[in-house]
Image (cartoon, rainbow, N blue to C red):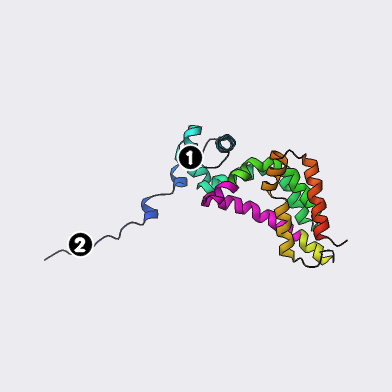
Amino acid sequence: MSTVRRRQAPQSRAAAEPRIAAALPDAPQGTRERILQAALALIRQRGNANFSLVELAAETGLSRQTLYLLFGTRAGLLMALVDDIDARSSGPAQLAALRQQGERDFEPYVRAWLEYLPVVLPVARALSAAAASGDADARAAWESRLAKLRHGFTQMARGLQADGRLRAGWTVAQAAEWILALTHIDLWQHLVVEAGWKPADHVERIVDTLRKTLVKG
């Protein structure tokens, strides 16, 4: 009597390869901060974010598995780096407070952003440049930051419209993009860093230009 052998179903990839998070112990306290500081140092040194998790692991003397455990992906690392810079400054909290308070005037929000911009400038420029070159991870991190900023500017433009102060010919979306363009990191880099404008002068001229172009006289 012949014996019929049952063919076992192949193990799923997920079952055969347990997730790193389940296979590794918790990283020592302070390791995350050490990695983020090393990533920031690389960005400042190179002027770009063109490094891999493998390179960063070698730079910190840690295993790749540790980096994957803590950040999951390179995009996760870059977004965590921006969040870490945010957490060390009062700027993002001030911007968030203005949004939550329902601030309807663009000026306090623009001033708060331009005060914070120099703090985040090195990382922001590195992410922007990498995103423009086709780096999907950097693009994800950069778009996440721009989305928050655009949301705030849209709220301010909507407030101008609701108060009847938005000049004729502007939509809320157009006004928000105009504010974003005039407060963009590239304009700061060109006028303040390269052309030598004083930061305070730059801020006043941007605010004045926005007031003259968007707000009814």
Of marks 1 and 2, the one in the foreground: 1
- Residue type at mark 2: give it: Arg
Mark 2 secondary-structure assignment = loop
Q: Which quadrant would the N terminus be assigned to in this image? A: bottom left
Q: Which of 2 and 80 is in front in this view?
A: 80
Residue identifier under label 1? 66
The numbered dot on residue 5 is: 2
Reading the chain from its start, which is encountered first: label 1 or label 2?
Answer: 2
**Residue 188 visible to an observer of this rendering:** yes
Picture coordinates of residue 31 (x, y %)?
55, 35
**Extreme residue in the front direction:** 195
Q: In which quarter of the image is residue 156?
A: bottom right
Q: Nearer the viewer, residue 4 or 55?
A: 55
**Mark 2 burial class by Cα count in 10 Å: few <14, some 14-19, many 20+:** few
Picture coordinates of residue 118 (x, y %)?
70, 41
What is the C-alpha distance between the residues marked 1 and 2? 43 Å
Q: Is residue 37 left or right of residue 211?
A: left
Picture coordinates of residue 72 (x, y %)?
50, 47
- Start and end of the magenta stretch? 128-155
Q: Which quadrant would the C terminus be assigned to in this image? A: bottom right
